[in-house]
Amino acid sequence: MRYRELTIEGRNAVLEAFRSGKTIDKLFVQDGCKDGPVMSIVREGKKQGTIISFVARERLNQMSETGRHQGVIAQAAAYEYALVEDILQAAKDKGEAPFVFLLDGIEDPHNLGAIIRTANLAGAHGVIIPKHRAVGLTAAAARTSAGAVHYTPVAKVTNLGAAIEDLKKQGMWFVCADMGGELMYRLNLTGPIGLVIGNEGSGVSRLIREKCDMQAAIPMKGELDSLNASVAAGVLAYEVVRQRLGV
């Protein structure tokens, strides 16, 4: 199956896409172009937390499908996003306590895709990602998920911290991956649980970490001090699975 993002080219088309509320994951702008319409597009992109890359015109020419990019190309999500309510409903329909992944600033689409795949196989009911400063459902993420995007809903929220607070009111508990936390085997990870995985480099942000009820440390015996984000997600997810199974 071939996945590809929706590509939007031309100043008016890109600006209208932003103003209509379409989720734009990436914006490519001709380096050095400072005229009014392009600066308006850049401002909209920054306002919405879109990843912006300033590239040479030759790069835009290579990316363009129409040859009329006018110095800007935007890429929208390859898949439609779900609502957080859809994820909770999926758990309810299965008669299970909610099990949700929340990703705090994952930037690599391959990590996002791998985590969605793990979420599916671990029986999680969905994945929540932030709208700003994080990768979205790009074609690369969809490919890496190996088809999991068809089955595991992904919701995109404006404020991850606010989403956690809302879900707490509905009875969920939250655990984040943190090297300074309690050994994961000593934590009670049963019941309605949200598993928070942080950025590839900086981990879970302080504000999000403070909203979590537990901090889980993965035991490490080698010379390195951290795991890849998607690997850490898998390790913690299967500790949740083990405890939910009661084994």
Image (cartoon, rainbow, N blue to C red):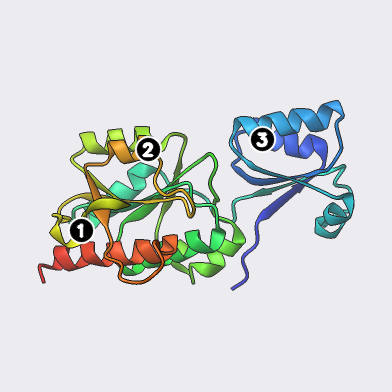
| Nearest to viewer (mark 3 / mark 2) | 2
Q: Of the residues under marks 1 and 3, which one precedes in the sequence? A: 3
For marks 2 and 1, the one nearer the N-term is: 1
The reply, left or right, for residue 112 in relation to residue 99 is: right
Identify the residue position indicated by label 1 in the image: 183
| SS at mark 2 in the image | helix
Give left or right: position of 173 versus 115: left
The mark that comes first in sequence, 3 or 2, is 3
Q: Quadrant of the C terminus?
A: bottom left
The image shows residue 138 at horizontal and vertical percentages of: 59, 57
Q: Distance of mark 3 from mark 2, alpha carbons?
A: 25 Å
**Callout 1 secondary element:** strand
Residue 208 on image: x %, y %: 35, 38
Residues 117 and 182: in front is 182
User: Residue at left 15%, top 64%?
Assistant: 243
Give the residue pinned by disc 2.
206
